[in-house]
Amino acid sequence: MNLFKKKLYYLLFTLKKYGLFYGFYKWIEIELFNSIKFNLRGMKHPIFLRRETTDKYAFRHIFLLNEYEQIEIENANWVIDAGSNIGLFSVYIKNRMPNCKIIALEPEKSNYEQCKLNLDPYPGIYIENKGLWKKDCKLNIIEKLELGKWGTQVEESENGEIEAVTISALIRKYNIEKIDLLKIDIETSEKYIFEGDIEWLTKVKLLIIEFHDRLLPGTARPFFVALNKSIENYNMFNIGDNILVENLDIK
């Protein structure tokens, strides 16, 4: 699809989501003017994007293509956003569930700073410049696949500059009894997360995960092994590029 057709494609989604006049105005603001700060109906605070990055793609997936609209959860207390990028998933969830507390994890420094810009106005959000991993260690950013700012990958390194964190460590730090919603989009690192300690998995009510087998074959397999080992009753759905798992053992 060429650039012109792509812009028309997103115009249709914008009009469908926000109506003729407001939608057309927002499409011009985002697609033609490349605004770096704009208000969006339904969002309590402005959204900030960076020019010449993949930020616009992340915005489209969440706010135009409605990738997470199928999430149905009431009275959420704790949400973990692993691979937060610039924080747009957390913005979306916080505006849907204002009383929930969110832990946003983002290892890449410039993404983290942009994430803070988007999330700092909201109360009850804890932003950590860390990468989700299977153990406490150090990580480095790697640029093997050149996926842009929304495709940051990490690898374990003794001399790494980034602190790794586990789900179990977050549960202890924040005294979490139940994770109502866990979103994992960590660009192949999911393979290693589920090869480690998985006791925490029984505490997750809803899990949204994007697999990256197209980038690294075998990334999904450890997850399904861990899932069937840990949770007896669950439902599974496709939502966009993600898999959503509902833990039926948690009432």
Image (cartoon, rainbow, N blue to C red):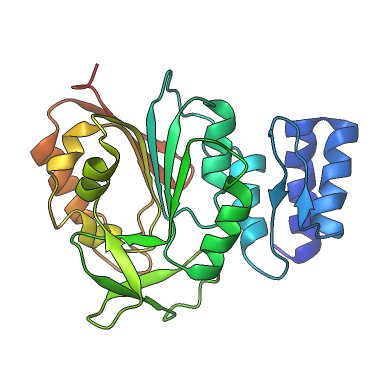
Left or right: where does residue 167 sit relative to residue 87? left
Where residue 106 appears, x then y in whole percent? 44, 59
Where residue 44 appears, x then y in whole percent? 69, 33
Which residue: 73% across, 32% down? 17
What is the residue that sits farthest to the left in this orientation? 229
Where residue 79 appears, x then y in whole percent? 39, 36
Taking 159 as reference, is 186 above or below it? above
Which residue: 27% across, 72% down? 138
User: How many marks on residues?
Assistant: 0
Name the quadrant containing residue 49.
Answer: bottom right
Which residue: 33% across, 64% down? 188
Where residue 51 appears, x then y in whole percent? 73, 67
Q: Nearer the viewer, residue 187 or 133?
A: 133
Which residue: 25% across, 79% down? 157
Taking 132 as reference, is 138 above or below it? below
Taking 47 as reference, is 86 above or below it? below
Left or right: where does residue 138 sit relative to residue 48? left
From the image, which quarter does the N terminus lie in?
bottom right
Q: Nearer the viewer, residue 212 or 29?
A: 29
Left or right: where does residue 101 sit relative to residue 251? right
Left or right: where does residue 124 sit relative to residue 25? left
Q: Which of 222 and 76 is in front in this view?
A: 76
